[in-house]
Image (cartoon, rainbow, N blue to C red):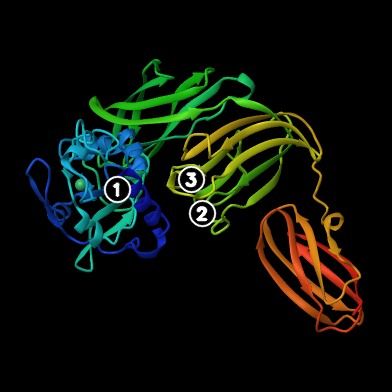
Amino acid sequence: MKHIYMLFAVLTISSTALSQLSNGSIAPDFTATDINGVEYNLYDLLDGGNTVILDFYATWCGPCWSYKETGILEDLWNTFGPDGTGDLYVFSLESDDTTTDADLHGTGPATTGDWVTGTPFPMFDNMSNVFDDYQNSYYPTIYTVCPDPVDGGYALVESGQASFDGHVAAAFMDCSNSITGAAPLVSYNGETSSCGGDAWNASAAVTNLGSEDVTAMTFSTSLNGVAQSDITWEGVLSNGGNQTVDLGSYTEIGTFDYTLIAVNGADWNAEDAVSIVGSTEATSYVQVRIHTDNWPEETSWEILDSDGMYIDGIAEGSLDNQNDMEFTWDVALDLNECYVFTIYDAYGDGLNSSQWGASPDGTCDVVSMDGTTEVSIVVSYDGATDADFAELVAGMEVTQVTGITENDLTSSVNVFPNPFTDNTTLSFSAAEAGQASVVVYNLVGKKVIEMNLGNIAAGTQTFELDFASMEAGIYLVSLTAGNETSTLRVTNAQ
Ligand SMILES: [Ca+2]
Ligand SMILES: [Ca+2]
Protein backbone atom coordinates (compact mmCIF):
# COMPACT_ATOMS: atom_id res chain seq x y z
CA MET A 1 0.00 0.00 0.00
CA LYS A 2 2.83 2.37 0.72
CA HIS A 3 3.50 3.37 -2.85
CA ILE A 4 -0.08 4.60 -3.14
CA TYR A 5 0.51 6.96 -0.24
CA MET A 6 3.75 8.00 -1.89
CA LEU A 7 1.92 8.77 -5.07
CA PHE A 8 -0.56 10.85 -3.14
CA ALA A 9 2.37 12.74 -1.63
CA VAL A 10 3.76 13.47 -5.08
CA LEU A 11 0.46 14.80 -6.30
CA THR A 12 0.10 17.00 -3.28
CA ILE A 13 3.63 18.40 -3.34
CA SER A 14 3.26 19.49 -6.90
CA SER A 15 0.18 21.54 -6.13
CA THR A 16 1.43 23.29 -3.01
CA ALA A 17 0.89 26.84 -4.10
CA LEU A 18 -2.56 26.41 -5.52
CA SER A 19 -5.07 26.30 -2.77
CA GLN A 20 -4.13 26.51 0.85
CA LEU A 21 -5.10 29.34 3.17
CA SER A 22 -2.67 32.20 2.79
CA ASN A 23 -0.93 33.91 5.69
CA GLY A 24 -3.33 36.26 7.43
CA SER A 25 -6.39 34.15 6.61
CA ILE A 26 -8.87 33.42 9.37
CA ALA A 27 -8.20 30.01 10.93
CA PRO A 28 -11.42 27.95 10.75
CA ASP A 29 -12.62 27.04 14.23
CA PHE A 30 -13.07 23.38 15.16
CA THR A 31 -13.89 21.17 18.11
CA ALA A 32 -12.28 17.74 18.32
CA THR A 33 -11.65 14.93 20.78
CA ASP A 34 -8.08 13.79 21.24
CA ILE A 35 -6.89 10.17 21.47
CA ASN A 36 -7.29 10.31 25.27
CA GLY A 37 -10.96 11.32 24.98
CA VAL A 38 -10.47 14.97 25.93
CA GLU A 39 -12.44 17.52 23.88
CA TYR A 40 -10.80 20.78 22.79
CA ASN A 41 -12.13 23.83 20.98
CA LEU A 42 -9.60 25.93 19.06
CA TYR A 43 -11.26 29.29 19.64
CA ASP A 44 -11.71 28.65 23.38
CA LEU A 45 -7.93 28.34 23.69
CA LEU A 46 -7.37 31.45 21.55
CA ASP A 47 -10.00 33.37 23.56
CA GLY A 48 -7.93 32.40 26.61
CA GLY A 49 -4.87 34.22 25.21
CA ASN A 50 -2.97 31.16 23.96
CA THR A 51 -1.09 31.06 20.69
CA VAL A 52 -1.99 27.69 19.07
CA ILE A 53 0.34 25.71 16.78
CA LEU A 54 -1.45 23.28 14.44
CA ASP A 55 0.67 20.43 13.07
CA PHE A 56 -1.15 18.65 10.21
CA TYR A 57 0.67 15.45 9.29
CA ALA A 58 0.24 11.79 8.33
CA THR A 59 1.76 8.77 10.07
CA TRP A 60 3.57 7.62 6.90
CA CYS A 61 5.10 11.00 6.02
CA GLY A 62 8.92 10.95 6.23
CA PRO A 63 9.55 14.69 6.54
CA CYS A 64 6.79 14.86 9.21
CA TRP A 65 8.57 12.16 11.20
CA SER A 66 11.94 13.88 10.82
CA TYR A 67 10.40 17.05 12.20
CA LYS A 68 8.75 15.20 15.10
CA GLU A 69 12.13 13.63 15.89
CA THR A 70 13.67 17.08 16.41
CA GLY A 71 11.47 17.43 19.54
CA ILE A 72 10.92 21.12 18.81
CA LEU A 73 7.14 21.04 19.32
CA GLU A 74 7.61 19.10 22.58
CA ASP A 75 10.11 21.70 23.80
CA LEU A 76 7.68 24.50 22.93
CA TRP A 77 4.89 22.73 24.80
CA ASN A 78 7.06 22.02 27.83
CA THR A 79 8.30 25.61 27.98
CA PHE A 80 5.23 27.65 27.05
CA GLY A 81 2.34 25.18 27.33
CA PRO A 82 -0.11 24.86 30.23
CA ASP A 83 2.55 23.24 32.45
CA GLY A 84 5.10 25.91 31.45
CA THR A 85 4.36 29.62 31.21
CA GLY A 86 0.77 28.94 30.08
CA ASP A 87 0.85 30.96 26.87
CA LEU A 88 0.74 28.37 24.07
CA TYR A 89 -0.92 25.17 22.85
CA VAL A 90 0.22 22.60 20.29
CA PHE A 91 -2.21 20.33 18.43
CA SER A 92 -0.98 17.19 16.68
CA LEU A 93 -3.48 16.59 13.85
CA GLU A 94 -3.10 13.28 12.02
CA SER A 95 -5.06 13.97 8.86
CA ASP A 96 -5.15 10.78 6.81
CA ASP A 97 -8.42 8.97 7.56
CA THR A 98 -7.08 5.69 6.12
CA THR A 99 -4.38 5.40 8.78
CA THR A 100 -5.23 3.90 12.14
CA ASP A 101 -4.51 4.04 15.84
CA ALA A 102 -1.98 1.22 15.23
CA ASP A 103 -0.21 3.47 12.71
CA LEU A 104 -0.14 6.25 15.31
CA HIS A 105 1.52 3.83 17.73
CA GLY A 106 4.04 2.70 15.12
CA THR A 107 2.69 -0.82 14.69
CA GLY A 108 0.43 -0.44 11.64
CA PRO A 109 1.24 -0.88 7.97
CA ALA A 110 1.45 2.83 7.09
CA THR A 111 3.68 4.43 9.66
CA THR A 112 7.22 5.64 10.16
CA GLY A 113 7.25 5.00 13.92
CA ASP A 114 5.60 5.54 17.29
CA TRP A 115 4.10 9.01 17.22
CA VAL A 116 2.39 8.77 20.60
CA THR A 117 4.98 7.77 23.20
CA GLY A 118 6.60 10.87 24.65
CA THR A 119 4.30 13.34 22.88
CA PRO A 120 3.01 15.59 25.66
CA PHE A 121 0.46 17.66 23.72
CA PRO A 122 -3.02 16.73 22.47
CA MET A 123 -3.05 14.29 19.53
CA PHE A 124 -6.02 13.89 17.21
CA ASP A 125 -6.52 11.16 14.61
CA ASN A 126 -8.40 11.18 11.28
CA MET A 127 -8.67 14.96 11.00
CA SER A 128 -9.08 15.06 7.23
CA ASN A 129 -12.20 17.21 7.62
CA VAL A 130 -10.17 19.91 9.39
CA PHE A 131 -7.28 19.39 6.95
CA ASP A 132 -9.77 20.11 4.16
CA ASP A 133 -11.30 23.10 5.99
CA TYR A 134 -7.81 24.59 6.04
CA GLN A 135 -7.50 23.80 2.31
CA ASN A 136 -4.20 22.06 3.00
CA SER A 137 -2.52 20.18 0.20
CA TYR A 138 0.57 18.59 1.74
CA TYR A 139 2.13 17.10 4.86
CA PRO A 140 3.33 18.47 7.10
CA THR A 141 1.51 21.80 7.13
CA ILE A 142 2.23 23.69 10.34
CA TYR A 143 0.37 26.87 11.23
CA THR A 144 0.65 29.32 14.07
CA VAL A 145 -2.66 30.93 15.06
CA CYS A 146 -2.37 34.19 17.01
CA PRO A 147 -4.73 35.06 19.87
CA ASP A 148 -5.33 38.58 18.51
CA PRO A 149 -8.93 38.83 17.24
CA VAL A 150 -9.18 39.81 13.56
CA ASP A 151 -12.51 40.28 11.75
CA GLY A 152 -14.38 38.13 14.24
CA GLY A 153 -11.85 35.29 14.10
CA TYR A 154 -8.16 34.55 14.58
CA ALA A 155 -5.54 34.75 11.84
CA LEU A 156 -2.97 32.11 10.95
CA VAL A 157 0.50 32.08 9.41
CA GLU A 158 2.24 29.01 8.03
CA SER A 159 5.17 28.78 10.43
CA GLY A 160 6.32 25.47 8.90
CA GLN A 161 9.07 23.16 10.12
CA ALA A 162 10.75 26.00 11.98
CA SER A 163 13.39 25.86 14.70
CA PHE A 164 12.40 26.30 18.36
CA ASP A 165 13.34 29.93 18.10
CA GLY A 166 11.57 30.36 14.78
CA HIS A 167 8.37 29.13 16.40
CA VAL A 168 8.89 31.31 19.46
CA ALA A 169 9.30 34.32 17.19
CA ALA A 170 6.11 33.42 15.29
CA ALA A 171 4.16 32.61 18.44
CA PHE A 172 5.08 35.65 20.51
CA MET A 173 6.86 38.37 18.55
CA ASP A 174 4.71 38.14 15.41
CA CYS A 175 1.56 37.43 17.40
CA SER A 176 2.11 40.21 19.95
CA ASN A 177 1.38 37.54 22.55
CA SER A 178 3.30 38.21 25.71
CA ILE A 179 4.99 35.54 27.78
CA THR A 180 4.40 35.41 31.49
CA GLY A 181 7.67 35.56 33.41
CA ALA A 182 11.17 35.52 31.98
CA ALA A 183 11.45 34.06 28.46
CA PRO A 184 14.78 34.06 26.69
CA LEU A 185 14.65 33.38 22.94
CA VAL A 186 17.97 31.78 22.00
CA SER A 187 19.54 31.46 18.57
CA TYR A 188 22.99 30.30 17.54
CA ASN A 189 25.24 33.06 16.24
CA GLY A 190 28.66 31.45 16.61
CA GLU A 191 30.96 29.97 13.98
CA THR A 192 29.77 26.95 12.01
CA SER A 193 33.02 25.87 10.44
CA SER A 194 36.58 25.18 11.44
CA CYS A 195 38.99 26.65 8.94
CA GLY A 196 41.98 24.42 8.30
CA GLY A 197 41.60 22.72 11.70
CA ASP A 198 41.59 25.98 13.71
CA ALA A 199 39.54 26.41 16.87
CA TRP A 200 36.00 27.67 16.41
CA ASN A 201 33.89 29.73 18.80
CA ALA A 202 30.34 28.93 19.84
CA SER A 203 27.93 31.59 21.01
CA ALA A 204 24.22 32.30 21.20
CA ALA A 205 22.16 35.44 20.87
CA VAL A 206 19.47 35.81 23.55
CA THR A 207 16.42 38.08 23.48
CA ASN A 208 14.06 38.29 26.44
CA LEU A 209 10.47 38.01 25.20
CA GLY A 210 9.09 37.69 28.71
CA SER A 211 7.47 40.16 31.09
CA GLU A 212 10.15 39.68 33.78
CA ASP A 213 13.93 40.17 33.75
CA VAL A 214 16.23 37.27 32.90
CA THR A 215 18.91 37.30 35.59
CA ALA A 216 20.49 33.85 35.27
CA MET A 217 20.78 31.24 32.52
CA THR A 218 22.48 27.86 32.47
CA PHE A 219 23.36 26.09 29.22
CA SER A 220 24.43 22.49 28.89
CA THR A 221 26.57 21.73 25.85
CA SER A 222 27.79 18.65 24.08
CA LEU A 223 30.00 17.98 21.11
CA ASN A 224 29.33 14.79 19.12
CA GLY A 225 27.34 13.49 22.09
CA VAL A 226 30.11 14.10 24.62
CA ALA A 227 29.04 16.46 27.40
CA GLN A 228 31.09 19.66 27.75
CA SER A 229 31.12 22.08 30.67
CA ASP A 230 27.86 23.79 31.62
CA ILE A 231 27.92 27.50 30.94
CA THR A 232 26.24 30.02 33.20
CA TRP A 233 25.37 33.63 32.56
CA GLU A 234 24.30 36.19 35.15
CA GLY A 235 23.16 39.75 34.61
CA VAL A 236 19.98 41.68 33.96
CA LEU A 237 18.22 41.21 30.64
CA SER A 238 14.91 43.03 30.63
CA ASN A 239 11.97 42.65 28.23
CA GLY A 240 13.16 43.18 24.65
CA GLY A 241 16.84 43.20 25.65
CA ASN A 242 19.56 41.34 23.73
CA GLN A 243 22.66 39.55 24.95
CA THR A 244 25.31 37.33 23.35
CA VAL A 245 26.40 34.41 25.52
CA ASP A 246 29.81 32.81 24.87
CA LEU A 247 29.39 29.02 24.71
CA GLY A 248 33.06 28.10 24.52
CA SER A 249 35.83 27.41 22.02
CA TYR A 250 36.44 23.99 20.47
CA THR A 251 38.63 22.31 17.89
CA GLU A 252 36.73 19.09 17.20
CA ILE A 253 34.14 19.39 14.46
CA GLY A 254 30.74 17.64 14.24
CA THR A 255 27.42 18.25 15.98
CA PHE A 256 27.33 20.89 18.67
CA ASP A 257 24.29 20.68 20.94
CA TYR A 258 23.38 23.40 23.37
CA THR A 259 20.38 23.45 25.64
CA LEU A 260 19.19 26.25 27.84
CA ILE A 261 18.39 24.12 30.91
CA ALA A 262 17.64 26.75 33.54
CA VAL A 263 16.32 30.32 33.59
CA ASN A 264 16.31 32.29 36.85
CA GLY A 265 16.80 29.00 38.70
CA ALA A 266 13.79 27.26 37.12
CA ASP A 267 14.00 24.38 34.64
CA TRP A 268 13.93 25.26 30.96
CA ASN A 269 14.34 23.07 27.89
CA ALA A 270 15.24 24.92 24.69
CA GLU A 271 17.54 22.62 22.77
CA ASP A 272 19.29 23.39 19.52
CA ALA A 273 22.02 21.69 17.55
CA VAL A 274 24.30 23.02 14.86
CA SER A 275 26.63 21.20 12.50
CA ILE A 276 30.20 22.41 12.58
CA VAL A 277 31.98 21.44 9.40
CA GLY A 278 35.66 21.19 8.68
CA SER A 279 37.17 22.56 5.52
CA THR A 280 38.27 21.00 2.29
CA GLU A 281 41.08 22.74 0.42
CA ALA A 282 39.80 24.70 -2.54
CA THR A 283 41.09 27.07 -5.20
CA SER A 284 40.07 30.71 -5.54
CA TYR A 285 37.75 29.78 -8.39
CA VAL A 286 35.03 27.23 -7.73
CA GLN A 287 32.15 26.13 -9.88
CA VAL A 288 28.79 25.23 -8.36
CA ARG A 289 27.08 22.77 -10.67
CA ILE A 290 23.53 21.61 -10.18
CA HIS A 291 21.55 19.24 -12.30
CA THR A 292 17.98 19.87 -11.20
CA ASP A 293 15.53 17.12 -10.32
CA ASN A 294 11.77 17.11 -10.75
CA TRP A 295 11.14 19.73 -8.03
CA PRO A 296 13.77 22.39 -8.80
CA GLU A 297 11.75 25.09 -7.01
CA GLU A 298 12.84 23.46 -3.71
CA THR A 299 16.53 24.00 -4.42
CA SER A 300 18.63 26.97 -3.31
CA TRP A 301 22.27 27.41 -2.34
CA GLU A 302 24.61 29.96 -0.84
CA ILE A 303 28.27 30.52 -0.07
CA LEU A 304 29.08 32.53 3.05
CA ASP A 305 32.51 33.66 4.21
CA SER A 306 33.88 32.98 7.70
CA ASP A 307 32.12 36.11 9.03
CA GLY A 308 28.80 34.86 7.69
CA MET A 309 28.82 37.41 4.84
CA TYR A 310 26.93 36.35 1.73
CA ILE A 311 29.19 35.78 -1.28
CA ASP A 312 26.98 34.11 -3.89
CA GLY A 313 23.93 31.91 -4.24
CA ILE A 314 20.42 31.53 -5.60
CA ALA A 315 17.13 31.89 -3.75
CA GLU A 316 14.50 29.19 -3.25
CA GLY A 317 12.10 29.25 -6.20
CA SER A 318 14.54 30.74 -8.70
CA LEU A 319 14.91 27.41 -10.52
CA ASP A 320 11.14 26.98 -10.75
CA ASN A 321 10.14 24.96 -13.83
CA GLN A 322 13.79 24.30 -14.77
CA ASN A 323 13.36 20.54 -14.32
CA ASP A 324 16.13 18.13 -15.30
CA MET A 325 18.51 20.86 -16.42
CA GLU A 326 22.19 21.65 -15.94
CA PHE A 327 23.29 24.88 -14.25
CA THR A 328 26.82 26.15 -13.59
CA TRP A 329 27.81 29.18 -11.52
CA ASP A 330 31.38 30.56 -11.35
CA VAL A 331 32.36 31.88 -7.92
CA ALA A 332 35.54 33.82 -7.12
CA LEU A 333 36.95 33.37 -3.61
CA ASP A 334 39.82 34.94 -1.65
CA LEU A 335 43.09 33.19 -0.76
CA ASN A 336 43.44 32.02 2.88
CA GLU A 337 39.76 32.67 3.58
CA CYS A 338 37.28 30.03 4.66
CA TYR A 339 33.80 29.64 3.23
CA VAL A 340 30.74 27.54 3.90
CA PHE A 341 28.72 26.21 0.99
CA THR A 342 25.15 25.12 1.76
CA ILE A 343 22.57 23.67 -0.59
CA TYR A 344 19.03 23.72 0.78
CA ASP A 345 16.03 21.63 -0.15
CA ALA A 346 12.76 23.16 0.98
CA TYR A 347 10.94 19.81 1.12
CA GLY A 348 13.76 17.92 2.84
CA ASP A 349 14.11 15.14 0.28
CA GLY A 350 17.27 16.42 -1.40
CA LEU A 351 17.47 15.98 -5.16
CA ASN A 352 15.97 12.51 -4.96
CA SER A 353 12.86 12.70 -7.17
CA SER A 354 12.84 9.07 -8.24
CA GLN A 355 11.56 7.97 -4.81
CA TRP A 356 8.24 9.60 -5.81
CA GLY A 357 7.96 7.89 -9.18
CA ALA A 358 9.63 7.84 -12.55
CA SER A 359 11.29 11.24 -12.51
CA PRO A 360 14.93 12.26 -12.83
CA ASP A 361 17.20 12.64 -9.79
CA GLY A 362 19.47 15.65 -9.51
CA THR A 363 23.13 16.19 -8.65
CA CYS A 364 25.14 18.92 -6.97
CA ASP A 365 28.89 19.37 -7.31
CA VAL A 366 31.23 22.07 -6.13
CA VAL A 367 34.50 21.86 -8.03
CA SER A 368 37.78 23.73 -7.57
CA MET A 369 38.82 25.01 -10.97
CA ASP A 370 41.96 26.37 -12.58
CA GLY A 371 40.73 27.95 -15.77
CA THR A 372 38.89 25.17 -17.51
CA THR A 373 40.74 22.43 -15.59
CA GLU A 374 39.14 20.67 -12.62
CA VAL A 375 41.55 20.71 -9.68
CA SER A 376 39.53 18.98 -6.96
CA ILE A 377 36.03 18.10 -5.87
CA VAL A 378 34.73 19.93 -2.80
CA VAL A 379 31.17 18.58 -2.84
CA SER A 380 29.77 15.65 -4.78
CA TYR A 381 26.12 14.77 -4.22
CA ASP A 382 23.99 12.45 -6.32
CA GLY A 383 20.27 12.29 -5.53
CA ALA A 384 20.07 8.78 -6.98
CA THR A 385 22.42 7.28 -4.40
CA ASP A 386 23.04 9.79 -1.59
CA ALA A 387 20.78 10.53 1.37
CA ASP A 388 17.87 12.97 1.37
CA PHE A 389 18.69 16.34 2.88
CA ALA A 390 17.14 19.62 3.92
CA GLU A 391 20.60 21.17 4.17
CA LEU A 392 23.92 19.91 2.88
CA VAL A 393 26.88 21.87 4.23
CA ALA A 394 30.56 21.89 3.26
CA GLY A 395 33.47 24.06 4.41
CA MET A 396 36.16 25.28 2.01
CA GLU A 397 39.55 26.77 2.73
CA VAL A 398 41.13 28.56 -0.21
CA THR A 399 44.77 27.51 -0.37
CA GLN A 400 45.59 28.22 -4.01
CA VAL A 401 44.95 31.08 -6.41
CA THR A 402 43.77 30.05 -9.85
CA GLY A 403 42.40 31.94 -12.82
CA ILE A 404 38.76 32.20 -13.74
CA THR A 405 38.29 31.61 -17.42
CA GLU A 406 35.30 33.64 -18.36
CA ASN A 407 33.31 31.61 -20.79
CA ASP A 408 33.86 33.39 -24.09
CA LEU A 409 30.49 33.54 -25.79
CA THR A 410 32.03 34.68 -29.09
CA SER A 411 34.22 31.61 -29.41
CA SER A 412 31.27 29.29 -28.85
CA VAL A 413 28.72 30.86 -31.21
CA ASN A 414 28.23 29.03 -34.45
CA VAL A 415 25.75 29.12 -37.33
CA PHE A 416 25.57 25.99 -39.44
CA PRO A 417 25.11 25.63 -42.31
CA ASN A 418 26.41 29.01 -43.48
CA PRO A 419 25.75 29.94 -46.26
CA PHE A 420 22.30 28.39 -46.08
CA THR A 421 18.96 28.32 -47.84
CA ASP A 422 15.83 29.31 -45.89
CA ASN A 423 16.83 27.86 -42.49
CA THR A 424 19.93 27.45 -40.41
CA THR A 425 20.84 26.51 -36.84
CA LEU A 426 22.37 28.79 -34.23
CA SER A 427 24.35 27.11 -31.45
CA PHE A 428 26.22 28.57 -28.50
CA SER A 429 27.39 27.71 -25.03
CA ALA A 430 26.03 29.80 -22.15
CA ALA A 431 28.24 30.09 -19.07
CA GLU A 432 25.30 30.64 -16.76
CA ALA A 433 21.59 30.20 -16.88
CA GLY A 434 19.75 33.41 -17.73
CA GLN A 435 17.84 35.40 -20.29
CA ALA A 436 18.98 35.15 -23.90
CA SER A 437 17.81 36.81 -27.10
CA VAL A 438 18.66 36.94 -30.77
CA VAL A 439 18.30 39.92 -33.10
CA VAL A 440 19.04 39.67 -36.83
CA TYR A 441 19.81 42.82 -38.85
CA ASN A 442 20.11 43.26 -42.58
CA LEU A 443 23.03 45.21 -43.99
CA VAL A 444 21.20 48.53 -43.80
CA GLY A 445 20.67 48.00 -40.08
CA LYS A 446 16.99 47.03 -40.15
CA LYS A 447 15.83 44.44 -37.59
CA VAL A 448 14.41 41.51 -39.49
CA ILE A 449 14.20 38.90 -36.74
CA GLU A 450 13.76 39.40 -33.00
CA MET A 451 13.60 36.26 -30.87
CA ASN A 452 13.39 36.16 -27.08
CA LEU A 453 14.89 32.79 -26.17
CA GLY A 454 13.60 33.12 -22.61
CA ASN A 455 15.38 31.80 -19.56
CA ILE A 456 17.92 29.30 -20.84
CA ALA A 457 20.02 26.78 -18.95
CA ALA A 458 23.79 26.87 -18.82
CA GLY A 459 25.52 24.77 -21.44
CA THR A 460 25.10 24.22 -25.15
CA GLN A 461 21.95 25.58 -26.76
CA THR A 462 20.62 25.31 -30.31
CA PHE A 463 17.89 27.32 -32.00
CA GLU A 464 16.49 27.35 -35.54
CA LEU A 465 16.68 30.62 -37.48
CA ASP A 466 14.06 30.99 -40.20
CA PHE A 467 15.11 33.16 -43.20
CA ALA A 468 12.52 31.65 -45.59
CA SER A 469 10.61 34.90 -46.06
CA MET A 470 13.73 37.05 -46.45
CA GLU A 471 15.72 38.17 -49.43
CA ALA A 472 19.02 36.61 -50.30
CA GLY A 473 22.01 38.44 -48.88
CA ILE A 474 24.23 39.02 -45.90
CA TYR A 475 22.76 39.41 -42.39
CA LEU A 476 24.18 40.10 -38.94
CA VAL A 477 23.05 37.73 -36.17
CA SER A 478 23.44 39.32 -32.74
CA LEU A 479 23.13 36.97 -29.77
CA THR A 480 22.88 38.16 -26.16
CA ALA A 481 23.24 35.69 -23.29
CA GLY A 482 23.98 36.73 -19.73
CA ASN A 483 25.91 39.98 -19.97
CA GLU A 484 27.63 39.11 -23.24
CA THR A 485 26.70 39.87 -26.82
CA SER A 486 28.26 38.29 -29.87
CA THR A 487 27.59 39.17 -33.51
CA LEU A 488 28.11 36.92 -36.55
CA ARG A 489 27.82 37.48 -40.32
CA VAL A 490 25.67 34.94 -42.14
CA THR A 491 24.67 34.52 -45.78
CA ASN A 492 21.18 33.64 -46.93
CA ALA A 493 21.84 32.10 -50.34
CA GLN A 494 18.27 31.63 -51.55
CA1 LIG B 1 -5.42 8.47 10.61
CA1 LIG C 1 13.65 18.11 -3.21
Q: What residue type is disc 2 on?
A: Glu
Which residue is denoted by mark 3 in the rendering? 354
Horizontal arrangement in the rendering, residue 489 relative to residue 116 (left or right): right
**Cβ of disc 2 within 8 Å of ligand 2?**
no
Determine the CA span between mark 2 and mark 1: 30 Å
Residue at horizontal 53%, vertical 39%? 384
The residue to which callout 1 is attached is 172
The label shown at residue 218 is none
Which circle, 1 or 3, is nearer the viewer?
3
Residue 230 place in picture, x, y as percent: 36, 18
Considering the numbered disc 3 on the image, is that residue within a helix, a strand or a loop? Answer: helix
Q: Whole-percent x and y of residue 196?
A: 64, 22
Left or right: 332 as drawn, with respect to 153 = right
Q: Is residue 425 visible?
A: yes
Kindly identify the residue that appears in the image at 28 percent across and 51 percent down.
144
Q: Secondary structure at mark 2?
A: helix
Name the amino acid, label 3: Ser
* Residue 417, horizontal then vertical, whole percent: 87, 66
- Which residue corresponds to mark 2? 297
